[in-house]
Amino acid sequence: MDIRNDWSFEEIQAIYDKPLLELMYEAATIHRKHNQTGEVQVCTLLSVKTGGCPEDCAYCPQAARYHTGVKAHKLMDVDEVLAKANEAKQNGSTRFCMGAAWREVRDNRDFDKVLEMVKSVNQIGLEVCCTMGMLSGDQAKKLKEAGLYAYNHNLDTSEEHYDKIITTRTYQDRLNTIGNVRNAGISVCSGGIIGMGENDEARIGMIYTLATLPQHPESVPVNALVAVEGTPLEEMKRVSVFEMVRMISTVRIVMPKTMVRLSAGRLDMTTAEQALCFMAGANSIFAGDKLLTTPNPSFTDDMEMFRLLGLKPRAAFKEPQMEASEMSVTAE
């Protein structure tokens, strides 16, 4: 199958609606054709600035307007972040993602400090990723010059369902940031969350938006909502592993070369359930005992799972990034 960016919603819906075992088989076949199935990218996510965010994302414990027990902390020091990055590298991670609970990146001393963090982590041989909210074109270029490898900016859900989850920014704001990241020659990481009250059409819609970008994201995280007390979605029930497998399989089929990350929600999954996700085409995980502020399986547990399933961590910088001239997209 050639890499396509001209998928129709109906084509993706037909894939998504297939009988689950048939869907998994097709996804696994495409996965084997385009990727080394015995390796999984191991990423670590660190909250370098926690809480106090002015946004109203209904799932997020870091929003200042919700009472979730998350204490706000100012931006960490560079040395402290570098120590965490070295620890992650020793534990087997090859990508280190730094998250800041900001609505948008501002040109100030904090951003200068982030640029120093990026330079420092890049120098120890890890792929450096940031997720810090909206980003201008100039800020993206500065991050690229500092050595940033990837930027995460999730769509979260479909455009139609978006205003039921977030009202403090628009879907186009999200797409503009992704465009700025792409134009700077930075690898794009963008996915979403299932289990936020959306229907199947919303899940398919999110995949459709990602799959019809001028270039597919290099990484697509598929998150299961972790319902946090104090947020508007605190009563939502956990999605089943079969819903996760259906999402992962569909993403794998329509974006064959993309890294598909099994992200939030893994703590509640058994090894057998995670194995189904790897079979369906997931080839990336977040490792470490915390994802920003929510619990996650320990490195020890994950390495035991890798041993049991015959998986190995994927090397850093395995595929060279494309040059900016090859990564252009227009953000209106």
Image (spheres, helix red, strand yellow):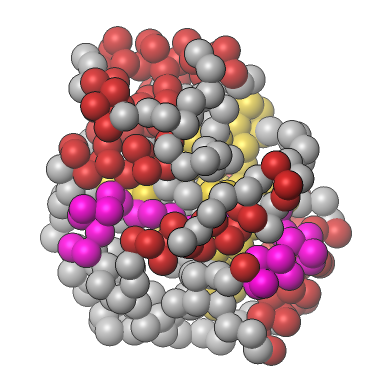
User: Number of labelled discs?
Assistant: 0
Q: Position of residue 30 (x, y in %)?
A: 49, 15
Q: Position of residue 275 (x, y in %)?
A: 43, 25
- Is 137 positioned to the left or the right of 132 in the image? right
Above or below, 46 against 216 in this view is below
Q: Nearer the viewer, residue 302 or 231?
A: 231
Q: Position of residue 109 (x, y in %)?
A: 69, 89
The magenta stretch spans residue 59: no
Q: Nearer the viewer, residue 167 or 194?
A: 167
Q: Quadrant of residue 54?
A: bottom left
- Is 332 positioned to the left or the right of 227 in the image? right
Q: Residue at x 71, y 66 (%)?
A: 141
Asked whether residue 4 is in view, the answer is yes
Asked whether residue 246 is in view, the answer is no
Q: Quadrant of residue 27?
A: top left
Above or below, 309 against 152 in this view is above
Q: Position of residue 309 (x, y in %)?
A: 53, 21
Q: Residue at x 68, y 33 (%)?
A: 314
The magenta stretch spans residue 153: yes
In the image, farthest residue toward the bottom = 109
Q: Nearer the viewer, residue 246 or 311?
A: 246
Q: Quadrant of residue 10?
A: top left
Above or below, 244 against 300 in this view is above
**What is the magenta range?**
138-164
Q: Nearer the viewer, residue 294 or 188?
A: 188
Q: Residue at x 42, y 37 (%)?
A: 212
In the image, farthest residue toward the right = 123
Q: Residue at x 57, y 50 (%)?
A: 329
Above or below, 114 against 122 in this view is below
